[in-house]
Image (cartoon, grey):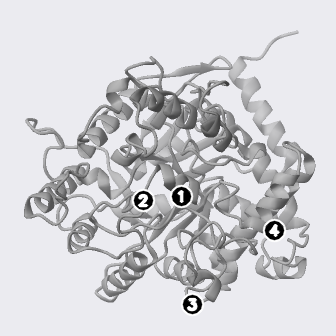
Amino acid sequence: MRLLPLHLYVVLLLLYCYDSRGQHSSFYADIHMHSSFAPFNSREIKDSGMWDVHCRSCPEKKLKQVIKSSKNIPKASQSNLISCVQGNVKLAYLSIIPMEYEMRHPKMVKKTKKKVPILACMAGCHVGYDFFDTDFVDYYDDLRQHIQYVIDEQQETRILNGQEYSFEIIKTKEQFERIKNDPYKVGIMLSIEGGHALGHSPLKSRPYDSPEYETLVLHNIDKLKGITPWQEGSDELLEYPIWFLTLNHFMWNGLSGHAKTFTAKQNMVFNQKENMNSGITPLGEKAIARLLSKEKGRRILIDVKHMSLDSRKWYYDYIRQQRILGDDIPILASHSGISGKSWYDAAYQQKDSDKKNKESYTNLWTLNLADEDVREIYASKGLIGIMLDKYRIAGDLIKEKVDALPNHSEEKRQLYVKVIAANILEIVDAIQTKDAWDIISIGSDFDGVINSFEHYETYADFPQLEQDLIHFFDNPADIFEWFSKERIEYLKFGHSGKVIMEKVMGKNAADFSLRIMGGKDHRLAH
């Protein structure tokens, strides 16, 4: 029998899989992931990169509390580039984050020798003692080194099923068009998580309101926008765009108040109370204006995830004012859960605490988006990424049901589908129009130390995730007292499950990306 070339077999197999299932998109997109976090921070200890699988290392006889608290965190990396290829993820926003000082110096863990295995267990980062043995962290320099690491990683390729795969950092819509038509390329777009990356770690005398610190932050913004050389002593400009920046992360950064992220037990170790839930500072206002400016350098959009509610309200007012002046600036929430409540709802207004979600199907912490947040993002033609953390996007009524079911059981898988579908539906319910479906995407937060849905733990599981959600939307069932099947059918606004998931799993993120690159909106998946 005459054999066909291997690449033709691959093409025929893909065509067969598409035709036989008739349900899957050509490829997928993710607007928030961390595939470089573990390899970059482990680079002095382990010779591996973004293509490789990084495993968490948790000693069985030590650190029992750490191991217990991290039982739902995947033991291996979720968004390594091999996983991208296996799951046909062609577009991914890589979130680059310098580890905050307080995460390197957790309370109650005094000895450096204990911190090393804790980080290896929690985040898969293998580091030396000197990683923690420091009283000062230059966040911008860490960021610069991380970006350079990703730039250099473009030289690395991998052979899979006899074919060589590579990735490129996307700079232009023309490059984007080429990559999406190349079956052996993965496209990466750069983003930054945390405005602390624009400066340095706190000192004994807080520098955040000093003229010197303001100059440093604004100068570093100019470096990232490609206005001035991005490394001191060099004349080289950063050629790769930073498409958006999450203004906040876990800790106080002098720019904006952050929302509560940690549970009571976590907060005992990583204290994030300083200026939590406060508003935008004068320096934050200047930083936002500089980041969004198109007069010099590239615009860097703001991601509202992790911002306090007061900070988000200020930012929405600012965006509305710019829109009146003729400048349409899209708002992003790259990896969020949806509360389904109003800002003014008594349940949403309660203090964020471990008890707040006790009688709720949704997660009501102000870290998550309320109806007004959703409407502001919609009005700005922005984008919302649904994160794939089973506890961040659900309340305790769901958590109890999840924890009561055996891992990898069919019952648990069906429950996970309902949780993800309900968060998607909350967005449409807040807007009540058919085009609400155009602002929803996936922002998985893979490799961001999340509590995974174990059925959908890596990119290789994305085809199954899409298939399960298509089936659910085509055959709606009650989601407890959360959504009735009749309500779900209404909120579909005539869309089939296939069309809904084409949008959510790839098309919306692709159209948004083309728009911010100056390209014309059109379908990327087909």
Label 4 packing within 10 angstroms: few (<14), some (14-19), many (20+):
some
Q: Amino acid at mark 2?
A: Gln
Residue pictured at 38% horizontal, 76% vertical: 311
Disc 1, SS: loop
Where residue 500 sits, quadrant-wise, is bottom right
Q: Nearer the viewer, residue 272 or 265?
A: 265
Give residue 467's position: percent from left, percent from top.
81, 52
- Tag 2–tag 1 contact (CB < 8 Å): yes
On screen, residue 339 above or below 520: below
According to the picture, the residue beneath numbered tag 2 turns out to be: 272
According to the picture, the residue beneath numbered tag 3 turns out to be: 344
Give residue 1's position: percent from left, percent from top.
88, 9
Q: CA distance from mark 3 to mark 1?
A: 23 Å
According to the picture, the residue beneath numbered tag 1 turns out to be: 262
Q: State the residue lying farthest toward the top.
A: 1
- Tag 3–tag 1 contact (CB < 8 Å): no
Label 3 packing within 10 angstroms: few (<14), some (14-19), many (20+):
few
Query: Mark 3 or 1 closer to N-term?
Result: 1
On screen, residue 134 above or below 257: above
Task: Name the mark nearer the viewer: 3 or 1.
Answer: 1
Residue pictured at 59% horizontal, 32% vertical: 63
Q: Nearer the viewer, residue 105 or 252?
A: 105
According to the picture, the residue beneath numbered tag 4 turns out to be: 496
Residue pictured at 86% horizontal, 46% vertical: 21
Q: Amino acid at mark 3?
A: Tyr
Disc 4, SS: loop
Q: Nearer the viewer, residue 505 or 20?
A: 505
Q: Is residue 149 visible?
A: yes
